[in-house]
Image (cartoon, rainbow, N blue to C red):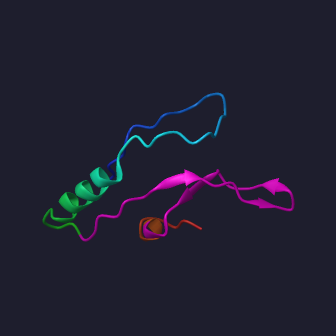
Amino acid sequence: MLVRAPVAVRADGDFTPRPALVVPETVIYLAGRLAAVPGVAAAVPDHVFYAQPVIGGRPIGDGRGHAWSAAALAPYR
């Protein structure tokens, strides 16, 4: 199951930090509730943030970084 907060998309390409749409306490609370559901093995928050790796002066990847805790969810590099 995937639970996702609303995403504020900016068409102008501005990467200026903006306030989080969901407060951390809410994330912790929801993860705990989901982890308590019978049959759920784990509930892991995935905090996505802007991160643009550059190799040889050229940007690579999609510009999205993930917290280490989310490594269990998918094959993030």
Q: Name the residue nearer the viewer: 31 or 61.
A: 31
Return the residue found at the far left. Answer: 38
Q: Is residue 75 left or right of residue 40?
A: right
- Can residue 1 be seen here? The reply is no
* Residue in the image at 62% along x and 39% along y: 16
- The quadrant of the rendering that contains the C terminus is bottom right
x then y, percent, for residue 15: 63, 40
- Can residue 31 be seen here? The reply is yes
The count of marks equals 0
* Residue in the image at 68% along x and 55% along y: 61
Vertical placement of residue 7 versus 45, above or below: above
**The stretch drawn in magenta includes residue 43:** yes
What residue range appears in magenta? 41-69
x then y, percent, for residue 27: 31, 54
x then y, percent, for residue 20: 43, 43
Return the residue found at the far top. Answer: 12
* Residue in the image at 28% along x and 59% along y: 28
Vertical placement of residue 68 versus 63, above or below: below
Q: Quadrant of residue 38?
A: bottom left
